[in-house]
Amino acid sequence: MKASVIGASGYGGIELIRLLSNHPDFELQAIYSSSKENVPVTEDYPHLAEICPLPLTKIDPVAIKETSDVVFLAVPSGIATELAPQLAGGHAKVVDLSGDLRLKETDDYKKWYKKEPADRAFIADAVYGLTEWNRENVKTAKVLSNPGCFPTAALLGLAPVVKNNLIDMKNIVIDAKSGVSGAGRGLSPLVHFAEMNDNFRIYKVNEHQHIPEIEQQLAWWNKDTAPITFSTHLLPVSRGIMATMYAPLTSAMTTEEVYALYVETYKNDPFVRVRPSKQFPGIKEVAGSNFCDISVDVDTRTNRLVIVSVIDNLVKGAAGQAIQNANLMFNFDEASGLKGFPMYP
Amino acid sequence: MKASVIGASGYGGIELIRLLSNHPDFELQAIYSSSKENVPVTEDYPHLAEICPLPLTKIDPVAIKETSDVVFLAVPSGIATELAPQLAGGHAKVVDLSGDLRLKETDDYKKWYKKEPADRAFIADAVYGLTEWNRENVKTAKVLSNPGCFPTAALLGLAPVVKNNLIDMKNIVIDAKSGVSGAGRGLSPLVHFAEMNDNFRIYKVNEHQHIPEIEQQLAWWNKDTAPITFSTHLLPVSRGIMATMYAPLTSAMTTEEVYALYVETYKNDPFVRVRPSKQFPGIKEVAGSNFCDISVDVDTRTNRLVIVSVIDNLVKGAAGQAIQNANLMFNFDEASGLKGFPMYP
Amino acid sequence: MKASVIGASGYGGIELIRLLSNHPDFELQAIYSSSKENVPVTEDYPHLAEICPLPLTKIDPVAIKETSDVVFLAVPSGIATELAPQLAGGHAKVVDLSGDLRLKETDDYKKWYKKEPADRAFIADAVYGLTEWNRENVKTAKVLSNPGCFPTAALLGLAPVVKNNLIDMKNIVIDAKSGVSGAGRGLSPLVHFAEMNDNFRIYKVNEHQHIPEIEQQLAWWNKDTAPITFSTHLLPVSRGIMATMYAPLTSAMTTEEVYALYVETYKNDPFVRVRPSKQFPGIKEVAGSNFCDISVDVDTRTNRLVIVSVIDNLVKGAAGQAIQNANLMFNFDEASGLKGFPMYP
Amino acid sequence: MKASVIGASGYGGIELIRLLSNHPDFELQAIYSSSKENVPVTEDYPHLAEICPLPLTKIDPVAIKETSDVVFLAVPSGIATELAPQLAGGHAKVVDLSGDLRLKETDDYKKWYKKEPADRAFIADAVYGLTEWNRENVKTAKVLSNPGCFPTAALLGLAPVVKNNLIDMKNIVIDAKSGVSGAGRGLSPLVHFAEMNDNFRIYKVNEHQHIPEIEQQLAWWNKDTAPITFSTHLLPVSRGIMATMYAPLTSAMTTEEVYALYVETYKNDPFVRVRPSKQFPGIKEVAGSNFCDISVDVDTRTNRLVIVSVIDNLVKGAAGQAIQNANLMFNFDEASGLKGFPMYP
């Protein structure tokens, strides 16, 4: 199957190139960029020398949709709103990694993204690809909206207790931390090396655009869903997200009971690993891989549940989950092309 | 005034040496260690070459108390239980940086530290030196118990709203992150460079020994104090703590109102800086200094308050606050010897 | 083909597990350790949870040689001296990643490693596996001695000009820098996170055991070989080596001429990439991959050649080259199992 | 004495603010910037909140020279060429941290800086402030040219053997490594966090503008001076330079003999620390301080001397040495305001 990547000069695009180039079932045939044209991708990314001969090409939606079986859209929010409808409706299936097709309520998009939303009906038809929880719809999707990095980590961690109504939905606190590749390749003093090195910052407190995305999925799972509190921090690392989540249990449970629920829930999911009690994951333990590792611990003094969820933001939080979804859309093995181990140390 | 440091081969001790050596009112006259004897401190710490000629000396409490005006105890928990009583009661004032004299309830000490506590009456007499909130008692202290690093960051951040009864005391969540110098100089796979580099870990979830210390102070401030939820993470940085704290407001307030309260509260405190709205501090902005920088933000959707507090764990979280307290104990300017700027970048 | 790894609890062993587990032609069947027995490898390396079910097993050379087609020895120097002869001579081929079989002159081994050498004849029969330069011998090797990490980077960089007699062999200076995974998993203050973070150190100046290994290969290539000057530095990164090398040209050449020689030399080598003029490689551009990237630049003012060579010390400098050699020993595609892209950023 | 800083929004300017604010003899009275006007310096540098009330002010040379006793120029190269002459000639002494007044041969400036030089006579009168080697001239300087960061590290390391004619001046190789603050605060993909983190790069091979500065001073010391080979690397750290230097000894010497020469040479210099044999300095051991730490080691196999020299590029390599020079220019204690210890860890 022929795959194209649009937005190939960003980190999400580059990670798609890494993963698709060694995918047994997809052939990466072309890469596109709005900022560069007819230059080898190796100009900006010399680590691809001699292994990725593709040039960055101008985006021509008509040509792309005709020549591709699947198009991965790794463009900034706002651009997919334009491009996705042009790419859809023909032969090619579309996997959009931006935030443009995630929020079914277009008013939410306007409010949190501060941009004009895509067509409401088009968004309604896009399948939200939190793979582990939406496999049947993903399999038949023509347009797939790939989840955000923070929502992926948070939702996989919260799902078992939210769906089983075991936590107080009005008191969920998510304290999230991300490596700086999540901020993209755009230059900014915030991620200037000398300033971020040996540093740690908090940003977008109570105003991150991933908040409505998390709440939307929570509401699909649980009718008592209420606004969450969500904050995001920048770690002085290249990759990785940890979401530390806190919520009161609605009735007393032991760590072992919660752990057993998580193990049972994810027993057939190749990319979710539930860690034994007190063996909390570090972000490096999933680096470069499509794994989401989860630990749970009950604070018996407060009857509050602590959930820790880690992913590589560029893999399970972006390119990896996109390919996992595409695998399902084409009826391939869900793990095809995603079997690389974490790179440790 | 003659100052001695016991436990000078650890990071807390080394930081005391750095700060005391340039202190205008204290003279660092001797340094002691239980693990090294009659070797120059420069053997393990060559950065002190030619500027700290003192050898590490065997700990002899009788001699130390006779020759010192103030003794800083920077030994591991469990050791101060033995040493502090031997050093106290004479001419010298004692500033203990360990956790041994902090918990007035000796049962709490046993439970959380898993060690035998010091004499209950001796602990009762030790003054808990959260400087900004206990100045009058600090001034007359003979034995001072210096707060832990996490409690310092957390308590300075929580104080204004806890004392004014503005948050739901039953729903405080503290998500704390620390640089690895907080783990000391002891070798461990956890802080082996190749494993901690580009990594981020969570540890001691719901079981950190700083929990009862925080709750003790909260209870002194507010009778509705209940167990908190507190988790700690390791950052891939050398120094710095950020405590991100969450609690529901008991009634609706704006960020501006909370901010105004904090500014008013700390207006005369030389080492607490309240940051303007949306200008959250990064840990590097206090590195090497005795500052605690605080931001507040109200999540209007949930009426939950987010408080961000950062310190340098070795300065305001250890050696700096110890000297700040000693300054008061000897009636010096509170900021004496602590006026160095943060080192940035 | 059945592969076993001995020394699987070290970083070299873990990297072999990562690469062999996704190798199409080798099946990793057992892993061995002298320090751990009958514990899952995931105990120390939780990143392998659910993907490497193998336990660490006690080393039994007789059983290993009978059940394996190839044995990778990733043990510390001194241990392979004992083990390699016990493993060799039967059905299994042996790939030794230690320094024990590299130096043909056993006196050199004694002098630089300060240990007793293996049997001289046994060492003589071991093939030195600098793959690009010894393919024919590698193909028929029964016992292969895998090059050291620094020698790999240095020798691939020096080969074209040394073999063609273009530099003054009496004036070669190699300034090498390595990530700390090269120092292994053994705990040491040198690589304690708080001390190595934001730091950079030089070590083993003029006394590194890789010096005679480099000189031995240079002498095989060029009869004018003389002692080199070689120094090693520790970078605050997990992986990667850069060797910056300096030598006077014996006659005037332009950068372009030297570059052309390198391109021609390595045109058929899948893992050596010669970078265009002034596009020097960074170590991250080969991270996780088996590439060696090389740049050259002539200092026209001094007629001195500067050669820059980078590898991932755990891949091309250890496990990757070992597999590259094993591929040849079993007549597989030289790049089999090694086609993963560098992980960037 | 009233001090002003021009270029206060760059890292050199910020470091001057840090050091001058706690200087007992200088009063920092005003700070100037070409890019910002009438904004508090805390806008870009919130670590200065409440401790540096000064606004960034528009540069008005006439006013500055009238109101200042000393002006520190921390502007990019090319700007000092304009400003320094306007500031000089009146009451105020000028300390220029740029490269504009360092090269006495204006053709060298043109060639290496690719800009128009300042007036030749004006440059001739500027005193080159490599403090340890030019104290008498510094004391009477009206316009002082502060050395570059790399030249400071390299020259202090080379001086004893160059002045005593002990090394082959035609074969000096300097392999220099710098933290990224040396690249300034200007944004660039090269120092974007996600790309520089866990990375190491080489840059400006054989073309760094500090080459002629080093050679100029070497020639003042030794008539046999010839072109050097000099390369520069970027370390993933915020601060620090290590220069590893190699040169053949002209006659056989032991490490001990060379060491003794260095100890004797620098015995009265408060900021140069010669490290005992085999105790090589790491860059963190001088971080935040004005020290230059030096080690020497003779490679007996090649009779080549290895010299290791480390500094903090922003202190001894910029702001610290500038203040050290200003201290001499005003007849203060040379170490005034510079007695802060290295910050370790």
Image (cartoon, coloured by chain):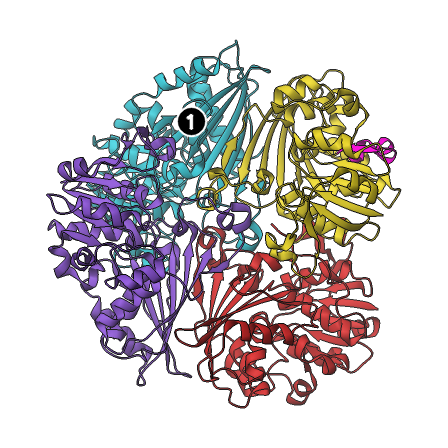
Chain colours: A yellow, B cyan, C red, D purple
Where are the magenta residues, as a range? A130-145
* Above or below A276: residue B147: above
Residue that carries the numbered disc 1 in the rendered image: B294
* Above or below D245: residue D3: above
Residue D227 in the image, given as x and y percentages of width and height? 34, 73
Residue B4 in the image, given as x and y percentages of width and height? 27, 46
Q: Residue at x 82, y 45 (%)?
A: A67
In the rendered image, is residue B178 in sight? yes
Q: Residue at x 34, y 78 (%)?
A: D170
Q: Tell me which corner region of the image, top left, top right, bottom left or bottom right, holds residue D303.
A: bottom left
Q: Quadrant of the C terminus of chain B?
A: top left
Which amino acid, by three-letter code, is at mark 1?
Ile
Callout 1 environment at 10 Å: few (<14), some (14 to 19), or many (20+)? many
Q: Quadrant of the N terminus of chain B?
A: top left
Residue B102 in the image, given as x and y percentages of width and height? 41, 32
SS for dot 1: strand
- Observer-nearest residue: C11 or C55? C11
Residue C9 in the image, given as x and y percentages of width and height? 66, 61
Q: Tell me which corner region of the image, top left, top right, bottom left or bottom right, holds residue B302.
A: top right
Query: Number of labelled discs?
Result: 1
Q: Residue at x 77, y 50 (%)?
A: A28
Q: Chain of mark 1?
A: B
* Above or below C225: residue D283: above
Give yes or no for residue C35 being in the magenta stretch: no
